[in-house]
Every structure is written in structure tokens, then in C-alpha cells.
Amino acid sequence: MMDIPNIDLNLLKLFAVLYETGSVTQTAQQLHMSQSACSHALTRLRERLSDELFVRVNNQMLATNYAHLLAKEVLPALKVITQGLNQSKEFDPSDAHHFTIAATDYTAWCLKPFLNSLLKRFSNISVQVIQLEQRLPIQALKDLKLDIVCGFAHQKEKSESLAQLNWFEGKYVTLSCQQHVPTYKLTMQMFLARPHVLIAPWNETRGIVDKTLAQHKKSRRIILSTPHMLSAPVCVQNTEWLLTMPAKYATEIAPNLGLTVHPPPLKIPNYHVKLYWYRTRQQDPKLHWFIEQFKDFHDLS
């Protein structure tokens, strides 16, 4: 059986709040304690852990090295405990709730209609969409720093730790400038002869086009790489460059930029846009409500 240290959970709550605020006064206010009681509780925690934990410098409580190490373990654990205790409560969308979603600029663009509808219907719900810095940020989902990831994949995948919902499947097209590239059929010879723009959300040096070309023992010349899909078509304006990207966005933006949409001269695997969340949150009422709202809006059920 795991040897769990005998420590008052309220002291760990105090530690977490003080670590985040750096102020005994603010900590006391958040925990609905008097400042004196807060100071006495901090003294008990220092004695229990045999460390100063926080040192007052310029009227601010600065964490010791031991406190920093402790925070890395305690703060995520307290979030998990709080989440577990809250799971017994029914989710009420009329209460204030916040969701954190990681997405690329493209998948955030795809989410916009749903989020607009959700936030109009539920005025106490708020959403923060943050940049998806890696394709599957499993640790951030586990630590409850993220609720949902909206990402994409080119193949079926299984994960013991993640649950996923397939949203839609999309194909690729190639964009070119009408003034510099003929509007008739884009041949493989022309495709390989022209410079290309690569969309690389995670700073990769090759994309799905390059991997597909490699299967045919061919390669293209990438002249520019960018992590930003929504602004990539602007890079092609007034150039001889080609850009291969999802048709869903390309066909909408191309007419405004004077670009031509071509079928690629090779068969590129379709991409799949998905929602991911941590498997241990399958029964989380808050997350379950969000997923059901998403399914109803997109008629996925």
C-alpha cells in the first residue's frame, strides 16, 4: 500500500494559493481566513515540511527551491482532487464555467461557428482558445491545463490515455497565383518545377505532401515554411509559388486573393479533424456536457 504522508489537506490548499499569489493577505482572502490564522497555518506547514517554503522580499512571499519542487507535484494533484470531487455534482450551464481549448489557427477557424453559437446560448460560459504547440499535448490534458484539443491527423490512431471524437474528413487542394501560374490543369512536372510554401504548425521540415512524394521517389523545393495556415495563402500572391492546403479554407479565401484552386497532381491522404481529451475525464459532467453540445451542433451523434 502506498505510504501517504500524514498532512492536513487544508495546509496544501494554503500552500497552493500562496505559491500562486505570493501574498499572505490575498491567500487569506481567497481561503476566507483571517490573516493571523493564515500566518499560523503557514507556520505549521513550515514545521511539518522542515523548510521555510516562502521568504518575504520587498513585501512579497518568494518560494524557496524546495517550494518550487513541491509545487510541481502538489498543484497538479490538487487540481485532480478538486476535479474528482466536483464530478459528483451535476453540471449546470447557467453557472460560471470556463473551458480551455488548444487548437491550430485552422482548427480554431473551423470551431468558430460552434463557439459563437455556444457562447450566445450560455452567457455564463467562457472559452479560451490557446495555440496548439504540439500535435498531442497529453501531459497538459492530464494536468488539467487543457480541457480539449482540436487537432488533426492523417491516419487512424489509438491512445491508452486519450479519448477522441472524429469531427470531419477533408481533402487538400493546391493554390497558385492566377497571374503567374497557368489556370489549366496542374501537372506533376509543373508541380515539381515550382517553389512551394509549407505549412508547418510544429516547425516540421516535411509535410504530408513531401511524405507522399517520397513514396513515389520524388521531392519538391520548399522556399518558405510558416506555422500559420490562415495567412499562408497571402504568401502565394504575386509569386510563382504553390501552396497545398485544406480545401475547406482554400476555396473560401482564394477568390478574395486572386488565387486559382487546383486538384493536386498526386493522391494526398485526406486529413481528419478531431477532438481529444484525457480518458480519465470520460465521466466528467463538465466535459461530457461540452462534447454533447458539440455533437448536437454538428449532428455527429
Image: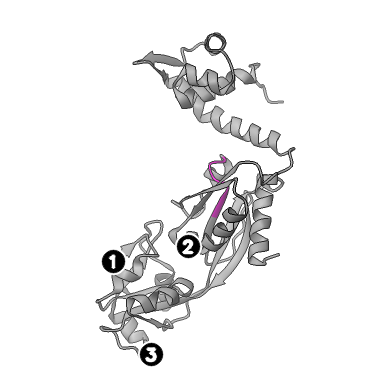
Q: Which numbered dot is residue 109?
A: 2
Q: Is residue 218 visible?
A: no
Q: CA distance from mark 3 to mark 1?
A: 24 Å
Q: Which residue is mark 3?
A: 185
Residue 55 image offset from top left, x and y in percent: 41, 14
Q: Is residue 71 visible?
A: yes
Give neighbour class at mark 3: few <14, some 14-19, many 20+ (Cα, 10 Å). Answer: few
| Drawn side of residue 191 relative to residue 238, left or right | right
Q: Which mark sits nearer the N-terminus, 2 or 1? A: 2
The residues bearing labels 3 and 2 have C-alpha atoms spaced at a distance of: 29 Å
**Magenta stretch encompasses residue 207:** no
Considering only vertical position in the picture, is 1 above or below 184? above
Q: Residue at x 66, y 45 (%)?
A: 94
Q: Nearer the viewer, residue 5 or 277?
A: 277
**Magenta residue span:** 144-149
The circle drawn on residue 224 is 1
Query: Which secondary structure type mostly characterizes the magenta part of the structure?
Result: loop
First in sequence: mark 3 vs mark 2 = 2
The quadrant in which the C terminus is found is: bottom right
The answer to whether the residues at label 3 and label 1 have Cβ atoms under 8 Å apart is no
Q: Position of residue 184 (x, y in %)?
A: 36, 91
Label 1 crowding class (10 Å Cα cut-off): few <14, some 14-19, many 20+?
Answer: some
Query: Mark 3: which amino acid?
Result: Lys
Q: Where is the N terminus found, in terms of image quarters?
A: top right
Residue 244 point in image, percent of width and height = 39, 74
**Which structural element holds mark 3?**
loop
Tag 2: amino acid:
Trp
